[in-house]
Image (tube, helix red, strand yellow):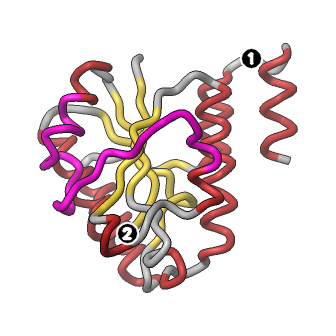
Amino acid sequence: MRKILTLIDVQEKLVPLMENKTQFVDNLGTLLEGAQLLDIPIIWMEQLPNKLGPTIPEIKDIMKGQTPIIKNVFSCGDSDEYLSVLNRYSPDEVILCGIETHVCVYQTAMDLLSMEKGVQVVADAVTSRKKLNHDIGLQRISAKGGSLTTYELLLFEEQKIAEGDRFRSLIKLVK
């Protein structure tokens, strides 16, 4: 199964407003490094960086060598540039992480599901300003057919084999 990860709007003016921001950033960093280790392509999105600032340095450093796609819409599915990149990879499943669970992540998930893509939302690598919004966003995504996962579950599920250099690197990353 071909998979791709979409990183949504982890920007300087948004992150400080989020619930559990420190844990979220740590989890997200591990997820992104693990995705790179496992050769899962990543599409990096930013919402109006002239207003919301760039991606936070901790995440931007992990994404070295890549450039974000700029959007002015909530759903990545409404961005022609995003859809162009997505279609080039032609994934069966899209993994979502970022900000905010109940707005951009939710709307992106709904659009991807309507395109008949599988959707996995990494529940511990998405967040909102308020816990209730985060929780309801996840519930609605799940109710509409999206799958919920955690960064560890996803990474080990992709790894499959409990031996070898890549496995040892993954263990170091998540421990």
Q: Nearer the viewer, residue 8 or 171?
A: 8
Q: Nearer the viewer, residue 66 or 114?
A: 66
Q: Earlier in the sequence, mark 1 or mark 2?
A: 2
Q: Is residue 66 magenta?
A: yes
For residue 115, side relative to residue 140 (left or right): left
- Write down the quadrant of residue 154 in the picture: top right
Task: State the separation of the CA atoms marked 1 and 2.
Answer: 33 Å
**Quick one: label 1, few (<14), some, or many (20+) residues within 10 Å?**
few
Picture layout, residue 83 above or below residue 46: above
- Write down the quadrant of residue 124 in the picture: bottom right
**Quick one: label 2, few (<14), some, or many (20+) residues within 10 Å?**
many
Going by the numbered disc 1, the residue's amino acid type is: Ile
Q: Residue at x 66, y 39 (%)?
A: 33
Residue 133, image x, y percentages: 36, 80
- Mark linked to residue 61: none
- Write down the quadrant of residue 4 in the picture: top left
For residue 7, side relative to residue 170 (left or right): left
For residue 15, side relative to residue 115 (left or right): right
Q: List the residue tagged with mark 1.
A: 161
Residue 161, image x, y percentages: 74, 17
Q: Secondary structure at mark 1?
A: loop
Give the foreground label among 1 and 2: 2
Q: List the residue tagged with mark 2.
A: 100
Give the magenta part as a residue range. 61-84
Picture layout, residue 38 above or below residue 11: above
Going by the numbered disc 2, the residue's amino acid type is: Glu
Q: Residue at x 60, y 75 (%)?
A: 21
